[in-house]
Amino acid sequence: MEKHIKTNKQTILFLCTHNAVRSQMAEGLMNGFFSHQFEAFSAGVEPTKVHPLAVQVMKELDIDISNQVSKHITVFQDRTFNYVISVCDNARGICPFFPGKQVLHQSFYDPSQVEGPEEEQLAVFRRVRDDIKTWLFTLVEEDKHQ
């Protein structure tokens, strides 16, 4: 059972199928860049483990997600979030309803699907990381104006 600490920060839950790449990177990016304003979590409907290349490309931004673990969405079933954000189409389609003040969807390509040399895989992981980062900065800017 998760401990819940009262805070003035807005809470965000990122959902993805395996809670291995996109939702983990989104959690790390929010907590890395916006920890003063948001507290981010992530979960999946079929959790596996955090992908090592996700850890590697996040370290390039000085964000360490190596201690994050894949979690099943039921870990958060009794919690209400300010935002619940699905970051893949599959999770959006099969996730049970999650209470949130705002429920959003923004699909990002799954870089774990790329095969080939590690450098090619890393390039896709970096692109997806940067796409998520850009989108999150836009989301936070829009949140300021609400």
Image (cartoon, grey):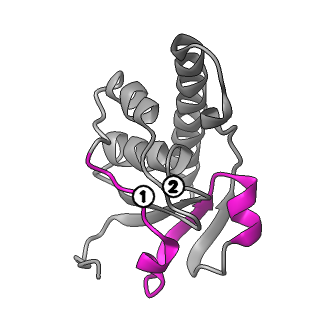
Residue 1 pos. (x, y %): 29, 82
Task: Count neighbours of disc 2 (C-alpha within 10 A) and say few if under 14, some if 14 to 19, many if 20 or more.
Answer: many
Q: Which residue shows up at 51% across the image and 43% down it?
A: 21
Q: Which residue shows up at 59% across the image and 23% down it?
A: 127
| Above/below status of 59 relative to 135 | above
Residue 80 pos. (x, y %): 47, 81
Are circles 1 and 2 on residues that touch, CB within 8 Å? yes
Dot 2: element: loop
**Which quarter of the figure has residue 94?**
bottom right
Task: Count neighbours of disc 1 (C-alpha within 10 A) and say few if under 14, some if 14 to 19, many if 20 or more.
Answer: many
Dot 1: element: loop
Q: Say which amino acid is labelled 1.
A: Ser
Q: Which residue shows up at 52% across the image and 39% down it?
A: 137
Question: As drawn, which residue projects farthest toward the front?
Answer: 116
The tally of labels here is: 2
Label annotation for residue 8: none
Q: Which residue shows up at 28% across the image and 37% down it?
A: 64
Question: What is the C-alpha distance between the residues marked 1 and 2?
Answer: 5 Å
Residue 39 pos. (x, y %): 35, 60
Residue span colored magenta: 67-94
- Dot 1 or dot 2, earlier in sequence: 2
Label annotation for residue 19: 2
Q: Say which amino acid is labelled 2.
A: Asn
Question: As drawn, which residue projects farthest toward the bottom?
Answer: 78
| Residue 130 or residue 69, whichever sits in front | 69
| Residue 46 or residue 33, whichever sits in front | 46
